[in-house]
Image (cartoon, helix red, strand yellow):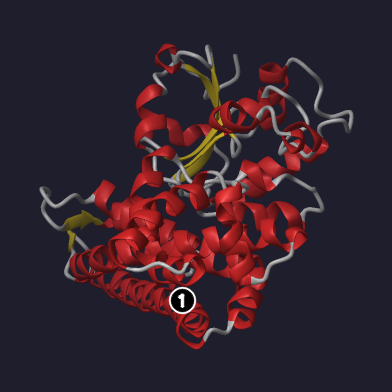
Amino acid sequence: MPNGMKIRSLALLRETASTSRILNLIRVRERHSDDAEYSQKPLFQHSRLNQAIIIKHTLRTHERHLVNSEQLTATKIIFALDHNDLRLGGFSFFVEQNDLQDALQVALGVKVSDGNYESDLNILREFARLPSLDPYLLRERVQQTGTDVAALYFDISDADLIRVESYVQDEICSLVALAYDIAGNEAKAISVKLAQLIMRNEQSSALEPLRRTLRLNPSDYKEGIFGWKGLLYYKWNINELKPKIKEILGRMSTTRFIRAHPEDEAQLNATRKAILRNVAMKFKAVQKTMVSYDEAFDALVNKKDPGTFRNFLLRAPALFNEIGQDLAAVNHICDFWEFRLPRAKPNRLEVDDAYDVYREFASALGGKYSFISL
């Protein structure tokens, strides 16, 4: 068994992992195996890999020697022992480990060097380059590799879905009133049902009035709804991040460095300043994009102009690469900081730990390890 493989329980992971941390292909198979596109346009060519669980994992100290990277997070591929009972656990390896090809060959039971599964290897490596597993970002990056994958493989995790739907209900209430010519409590009740359909079953005939209101022809409808789902997910994510980012950046700005020499203190302070500035810039950038969405939505609801909103939805996937990467970086920094320095712990870091953390943040932000250049 290659390094990095081990037995673990997966049931809790499925129930609690956020969308940005997990790509659960077992869940995709359960929901969509009867859909023709599931088998015609698979994410991975090997069926076993197409039923794996992929997570962004924060490395423990004893795991760091397994990966060929200075980053403190890695992309873990998990194969469940029993898809019907995840409590039995499974075995895993890291995409970033030195013997990736050997590990994959053992896991799949086939040679991956003969070209048959080269695209699978390329997709795994592309996932490893990304700061998160945000499904809308993943789809754009997979398409850039030239692989035609069905959109059904990219969806929100179980843990986030209910919360996103609750947010979507409020977002679409005014549009429901327009599309279905209703108001008040009736519009609210329909909004609850439609939010579930948009996020879970966008092909339902119950959404036909919505398609007509948006003036989307059947061929554009699937892509338009996918774009809308992505924008709604990002709006929800931004809304959730606002209070968190203020708190985390505040704590980060006052962190003390233990036993730091003057030159280390100066370097770390300059690095911290650059990181805080870049996090704020990325968050403002995604908020600006959402202002454009709000303006297009307002044109539809209040000015009865469906064309502006329809066009925005159809070009939305082209925005996901930038939005997804910026939000992924901000989410990762907030989550990693809470993992490394939770509120209950003193707000201080050893010098070596501070360099490790800031190196991780610099990588997430797209900078080099020479932090001042951020």
Residue lying farthest front?
181
Query: Is residue 140 visible in this depiction of the protein?
Result: yes
Residue 39 place in picture, x, y as percent: 76, 31
Displayed quadrant of residue 171 = bottom left
Is 35 positioned to the left or the right of 355 in the image? right
Quadrant containing the N terminus in the rendered view: top right
Residue 62 place in picture, x, y as percent: 39, 30
Instruction: Give, as a three-letter code, the residue at label 1.
Output: Met
The residue under label 1 is 290
| Image point (49%, 34%), residue name | 65
Which residue is nearer to you in this view: 38 or 221? 221
Which residue is nearer to you in this view: 158 or 261? 158
Is 95 positioned to the left or the right of 22 in the image? right
Vertically, is 152 above or below 373? Answer: above
Q: Secondary structure at mark 1?
A: helix
| Image point (47%, 72%), residue name | 178
| Image point (61%, 57%), residue name | 208
Residue 278 place in picture, x, y as percent: 41, 76
**Tag count:** 1
| Image point (14%, 58%), residue name | 347
Vertically, is 67 above or below 225? Answer: above
Vertically, is 95 above or below 282? Answer: above
Query: Is residue 319 visible in this depiction of the protein?
Result: no
Residue 154 place in picture, x, y as percent: 60, 46
Classify mark 1: residues with Cα within 10 Å, few (<14), some (14-19) or many (20+): some
Displayed quadrant of residue 104 = top right
Residue lying farthest bottom?
303
Vertically, is 357 above or below 8? Answer: below
